Image (spheres, rainbow, N blue to C red):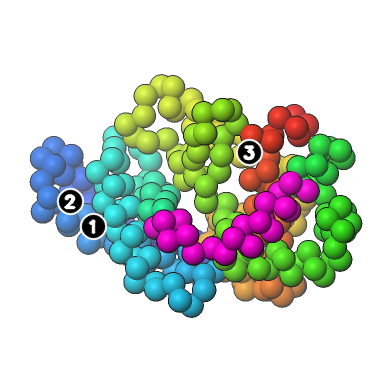
Amino acid sequence: MKARSPVTDVQRDEIDALWERYKASGKRNVRDQLLLQYSPLVKYVAGRVAAGLPNNIDRSDLVSSGMFGLVDAIEKFDPSRGFRFETYAISRIRGAIMDELRALDWVPRSVRNKARRIEDAIAELEARNHRPPTDVELAEHMSISVDQLQTTLSQISMTGVAALDDLLSISGGSGDAVTLGDTIADRSDGPSDVFESAEMSDRLRTAIAALPERERLVLGLYYFEGLTLAQIGEVLGVTESRVCQIHTKSVLQLRTRLSDRERLLPA
């Protein structure tokens, strides 16, 4: 179940005309009309992010932050490039929401430490075995039981630390970072920026292809088909909690491969 476009086929011509007016004039009242048309995207993204957050996080705050991302997307989007605005906007909206959450620093330090420990273990095992580790191998390497590992993965998933389009570091000493959404080239990017974005997309695609089949399926159903974790559980015949664990482990493996430690892993 993918996110529905807030724009129907009947409205498309009118929206295209609205884009032409805005890009030609830059008038705020025209931009506000576009904001109104695409505002359902913000509620959609905020809902997806909020699904894994503690109850003390106010969803209305997420929506407010997401609106800033929508404004940014509208101002930077170039319709002439032929890309769908919805795809471009979702990455910007989620980025704005995640920036707000990071500014709040609401994730417990203990959870961050647990996530880092698992990432370190994954990196060491992949360097040794030239493949992603199983749950049993990962638990043994960390000197914990499989049940303890799965409990830890559930704790990490409930904080939202492990999201595929959360912050991902790029190899190198520059300290630059991108989100998954940033792999969609900015319409104002120059040739070098477009090349770097394409390279990042290729690296992410390669990393996903190296995952076991079930982990690839979970990522595909969640991020590209828009299914909820509960719906994915029904497809796979497992509990929603187990899907959370699979998703979290998969994302931590991808973060490991795309981090500076990627040089330790097989090509």
Query: Any mark on residue 224, and which?
Result: none
Q: Secondary structure at mark 1?
A: helix
Name which residue lies at 66% across and 56% down: 113
Name which residue lies at 58% across and 28% down: 172
For the residue pair 143 and 241, the one nearer the viewer reads as 143
Whether residue 86 appears in this view of the structure is no
Residue 220: percent from left, percent from top: 62, 54
Q: Which residues are magenta?
A: 100-121
> Given the current orientation, which residue lies at the most extreme front position?
109
- Say which of marks 3 and 2 sits in front: 3
**Mark 3 residue type:** Ser
Q: Main secondary structure of the magenta part?
A: helix
Disc 1: CA contacts within 10 A as few (<14), some (14-19) or many (>=20): some
The residue tagged 2 is 31
The residue tagged 1 is 35
Decide if residue 265 is on the left or right side of residue 155.
Answer: right
Res. 101 image quadrant:
bottom left
Between the C-alphas of marks 1 and 2, the distance is 6 Å
Residue 190: percent from left, percent from top: 37, 24
Whether residue 54 appears in this view of the structure is yes
The residue tagged 3 is 259
Q: Earlier in the sequence, mark 3 or mark 2?
A: 2
Q: Is residue 264 above or below residue 29?
A: above
Q: Secondary structure at mark 3?
A: loop
**Mark 2 residue type:** Arg
